[in-house]
Amino acid sequence: MKKEITIVISGEAGQGLATIEDFLVRAISQTYYVFATTEVMSRVRGGNNSLEIRVSNSPVYAYKEHIDFLYLLNNDSLYRLKDRIDSNSKIFGEVNFITEKDHERLSDQFIPLPLTDYASSAGSVLFSNTLLFGQIAGILNLDVDYCHTLISERFSAKNENVQLGNIKAFDIGFDIGIPYQSFHDLLTQKTDHMKILTGSEAIGIGSLGGGCNFIASYPMSPGTGVMTYLASKSNEFGVFVEQAEDEIAALNMAIGAWYAGARALVTTSGGGFALMQEAVSLSGVTETPCVTHIGQRPGPGTGLPTRTAQQDLNLVVYAGHGEFPRVIYAPGTMEDAIVLSQKAFYMADKYQIPTFILSDQFLLDSKFQMAPFELDGKYLESFVVKSDANYKRYKLTENGISPRAIPGSGKGLVKCDSDEHTEDGLITEDFNIRIQMNDKRLSKISMILDDYEMPELIGPDDYINLIVGWGSTYGVLKEYVDNKGLKDTAFLYIKQPFPLHPDIKKYFDKAKRIINVENNATAQFAGLLKLELDIKVTDNLLKCNGAPFSIEDVATYMEEVL
């Protein structure tokens, strides 16, 4: 039977939530399954952020509303979380962090935890976060030696007194936490073979595995994490990193890099990608590969810049003027974030098209566990040819793919033009040539579908109800189907929302009821299903307030619908 607890730590930006998260997730992952996600307000200082950590004896992937243990780090920590606690929740914090009214209401649940006093006894109030780490470690009975190692590594650049003081603070906290072990009945699991990754790191790893050696981007959350990850690996993997002056310059640089022989990436968010539209079309007409990662957040405009959404699917499907093929991948797991990012580079190179990795803030910033696996070297295959003296960049071929050469590699001149062009790459207004070139570009769609990333069916094969989701809804929908164990309900996880392969229609034809789940207000993927495959969705579970779907959201809706 699944057993779990949800821990939430609430405090102001700058209070060290990221450090606590790193300590706890790494330590917990040695013993239990763990998932962590943050809620961050859009401000440098002030406001209130929260960190959620789910601990379980079976895999967890999703956000949960209900809080079992709540930790308050300041006097603004409680007010935004009152709806997420009940009579079974335990609340820890300094006495003055809740009001007298809340003291009366929560008298049986509130447990004073004077972190600063305890930390001072260890040598400094600066050790408060380490003491909190220790207290939670004590509750969960984590491996003390491993926790000590984490602390020593974190403060290795500090003097010995700082290291010893933090370890002492941890030990004090651990002893304080031990009496509260009775509040949970988790079963110990050995999960130290699992790796902890954020979505940003997974997409960065996949990009490196796809041969990425150039990234040009203009920073925009939540996509910036991919850029900073690749920058941190630039020396080790030979990645040229350029912070462009604006978004369209970034994509133009990436297209230029592909033209010169690199494998380039751009990372951005919806608002930044909106400014890249002309460059997307440039990739389409010049048949120059490019790979773009879009980390979605709520719009329109600046919207909610630190929250999550799935509102940019239509934007990416229809980006750029004119008609030309493209591929969109939407990973929902860390494994797929790696593999589909690799494949995005492979497909861009093979078919000379723009490809897109579509993620969101929730996937990018949350921390997931993943079993290690070997990357497939097939995605590093290069489709570049050496030019001869009679080289034609846009040669009409039987399969519609012209040989792509790199300037300076071979005897021919590589001509590339954003106007309609002849086989040689010269500008033309000949109507017949226009039709030939347009047909050549669009003919790639059938071949692209031969490389389609088929969806994954989770649950029984003989289902009546089919839940469909793409991207980051994977975790919450998989947990629902796995935990409920309904014999008549399955979940279809879509990894490539565009273009859609006609063969996936078989999954929908079997179902009497189709429930589409998306983090947007207009059911964009349901619209694509109808437009591309004439599949009519029965019900839509939609959410557009900036928060991810919770376990409770899905369970409540499915009970009503099913």
Image (cartoon, helix red, strand yellow):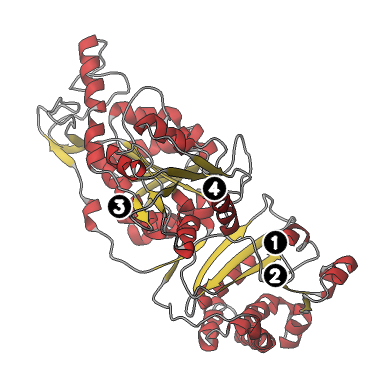
Residue, disc 2: 70
Residue, disc 1: 84
Give the label, 4 or 2, closer to the camera. Answer: 4
Residue 235, picture quadrant: bottom left
Label 4 – label 2 distance at C-alpha: 32 Å
Is tag 4's residue or tag 2's residue first in the polypeptide sequence? 2
Give the label, 2 or 3, closer to the camera. Answer: 2
Give the label, 4 or 1, closer to the camera. Answer: 4
Cβ atoms under marks 1 and 2 closer than 8 Å: yes
Secondary structure at badge 1 equals helix
523 versus 5 height, above or below: above
Cβ atoms under marks 2 and 3 closer than 8 Å: no
Q: Is residue 233 left or right of residue 222?
A: left
Is tag 1's residue or tag 2's residue first in the polypeptide sequence? 2
Give the label, 1 or 2, closer to the camera. Answer: 1
Whether residue 36 appears in this view of the structure is yes
The type of residue carrying mark 4 is: Val
Label 1 – label 2 distance at C-alpha: 10 Å
Q: Which mark is residue 210?
A: 3
Q: Residue at x 53, y 39 (%)?
A: 311
Answer few, some or many: residues within 10 Å of disc 3's Cα (few below 14, many 20 plus, some between 14 and 19): many
